[in-house]
Image (cartoon, rainbow, N blue to C red):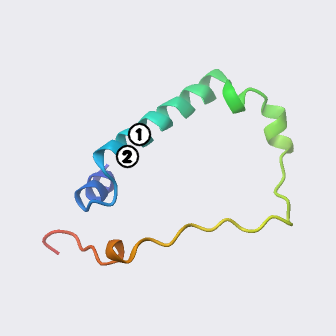
């Protein structure tokens, strides 16, 4: 919980973005509970395998300004 407040306080995530992530999390948890959406067919998920020919996923680099943000008071 503290980490969430910290990233919002630092401006890394806006309140609107945070609320959107919370809403998406709630939707996914509901689909898991109901076994609906992409989670309806558990057999297809257990058969899924990563294709070794696919490139490894990479996260985008943060903007340089975000790398210099320091927490308040520290």
Count numbered badges in the picture: 2
Residue nearest the viewer, comparing 39 with 10 = 10
Picture coordinates of residue 38 (x, y %)? 71, 32
Q: Secondary structure at mark 1?
A: helix
Residue 48 versus residue 16: which sits nearer the camera? Answer: 16
Q: Is residue 43 above or below residue 55?
A: above
Q: Nearer the viewer, residue 34 or 17?
A: 17
- Above or below for 26 versus 63: above
Question: Is there a contact, CB below 8 Å, between mark 1 and mark 2?
Answer: yes
Residue labelled with disc 1: 20
Q: Residue at x 31, y 50 (%)?
A: 14
For residue 39, what is the image quadrant?
top right
Residue at the (50%, 73%) spot, across then down: 61
In screen coordinates, is 69 left or right of 39? left
Task: Give coordinates of residue 52: x percent, y percent.
Answer: 85, 65
- Separation of residues labelled 1 and 2 (CA atoms): 5 Å
19 left or right, relative to 41: left
Instruction: Check disc 2 and report its element: helix, strand or loop.
Output: helix
Q: Along the horizontal axis of the image, is 39 left or right of 24?
A: right
Counting from the top left corner in percent of width and height, residue 71 is at: 22, 70
Q: Quadrant of the C terminus?
A: bottom left
Q: Residues within 10 Å of mark 1 (few under 14, many from 20)?
A: few
* Residue at the spot of label 2: 17
């Amino acid at each position: 919980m503290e980490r969430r407040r910290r990233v919002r306080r630092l401006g890394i995530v806006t309140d609107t973005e945070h609320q959107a992530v919370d809403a998406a999390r709630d939707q996914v948890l509901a689909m898991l509970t109901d076994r609906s959406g992409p989670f309806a067919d558990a057999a297809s998920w257990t058969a899924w395998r990563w294709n070794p020919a696919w490139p490894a996923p990479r996260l985008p680099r943060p903007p340089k300004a975000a790398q210099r943000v320091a927490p308040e008071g520290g």
